[in-house]
Image (spheres, rainbow, N blue to C red):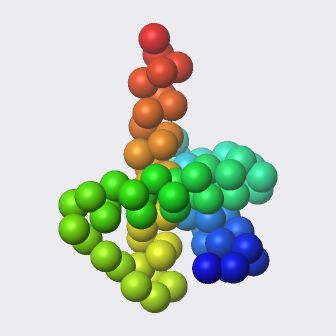
């Protein structure tokens, strides 16, 4: 995937994850960062489970799952 679609999907995924986990977005740049890292994390985790999602919707779902996991992990670390 090239950089522009990665940033767009990452931004949307980060915003969705922020809405799901905290009820609000994190801001444009934080949404993109969380979404992009989440996309990489989500892809790695889902590949370990044998799940492969193709297409834009699949990439968005994968990135969102990874971003939610990343935000959940950040909340755990922040509480400690």
- The x and y percentages for residue 25 are 64, 51
**Which residue of the protein is positioned furthest toward the top in this rendering?**
80
Residue 51, quarter of the rendered image: bottom left
Q: Can the viewer see residue 17 in this picture?
A: no
Residue name at image x 69 percent, y 58 percent: 32
* Camera-side residue of 18 and 51: 51
Q: Quadrant of the C terminus?
A: top left
Q: Is residue 50 left or right of residue 30?
A: left
Q: Is residue 2 left or right of residue 34?
A: right
Q: Can the viewer see residue 56 in this picture?
A: yes
Residue 18 drawn above or below residue 9: above
- The x and y percentages for residue 45 are 34, 55
- The x and y percentages for residue 7 are 71, 69
Residue name at image x 46 percent, y 88 percent: 55
Q: Quadrant of the N terminus?
A: bottom right
Residue 63 drawn above or below residue 55: above
């Amino acid at each position: 995937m090239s950089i522009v679609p990665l940033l767009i999907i990452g931004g949307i995924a980060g915003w969705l994850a922020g809405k799901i986990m905290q009820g609000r977005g994190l801001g444009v740049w934080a949404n993109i960062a969380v979404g992009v890292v989440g996309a990489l994390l989500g892809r790695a985790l889902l590949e370990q489970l044998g799940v492969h999602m193709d297409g834009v919707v699949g990439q968005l779902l994968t990135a969102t799952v990874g971003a939610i996991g990343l935000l959940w992990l950040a909340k755990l670390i922040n509480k400690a």
